[in-house]
Image (tube, helix red, strand yellow):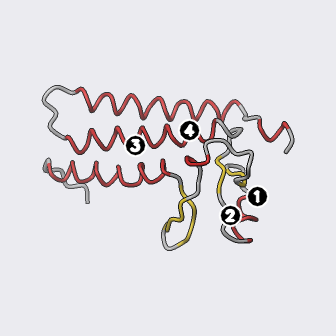
Amino acid sequence: MSDSSLKTDNKTDRDMKMGIFLATITAIFFAIIPGFDGALISTGFFLISFGGLLNFLAIRFNGGRMPALAKNLHWKKTIESSPKHILLNRNTRLKCLCDIIPMNRDGDECMGSIGDLLIKHSVWSIYSGLFLLGFELF
């Protein structure tokens, strides 16, 4: 692996930092509102922020790209051609935070991370909290 594959461009790095910052500020905002009884909502925002932080750590410690486990040759070719992913190997850091969990996204098999699972299930926590508070979203 060359040194150039470990470098991130400034825009990607800045975007990741901004996303983590905004998610954290939002979680803190909902957690400290006086009289806000939307426990599911504030818990959901906290878990989204935590899931984003876990993804950020995996990406940051692996040269700016998320390592992913390839189950078959098709996935290996897809990961190799992706600008956002690299193949998981023995040099990968924080393997437990990388895309190693088989998931189903819109009927398509894919790999996800523990951070992805937290984010995905937190969205439903927020939706449930809003519904219980009387908001109708759909």
Q: Is residue 25 above or below residue 98?
A: above
Q: Element at badge 3?
A: helix
Q: In this view, does 75 lie to the left or right of 121?
A: right
Disc sitting over residue 80 in the figure: 1
Q: Distance between the residues labelled 3 and 4?
A: 12 Å
**Residue at coordinates 40% horizontally, 43% vertically from top-left?**
48
Please name which of the two marks, 3 or 2, marks the residue nearer to the observer.
Answer: 2
For mark 2, does the 10 Å Cα neighbourhood hold few (<14), some (14 to 19), or many (20 or more) residues? many
Q: Element at badge 1?
A: helix
Q: Residue 99: x percent and y percent?
A: 58, 54
Q: Residue 73: x percent and y percent?
A: 74, 71
Q: Which of marks 4 and 2 is nearer the N terminus?
A: 4
Q: Is residue 31 left or right of residue 2?
A: left
Q: Which of marks 3 and 1 is nearer the N terminus?
A: 3
- Tell me the amino acid under the disc marked 3: Ile
Q: Distance between the residues labelled 3 and 2?
A: 26 Å
For mark 4, does the 10 Å Cα neighbourhood hold few (<14), some (14 to 19), or many (20 or more) residues? many
For mark 1, does the 10 Å Cα neighbourhood hold few (<14), some (14 to 19), or many (20 or more) residues? some
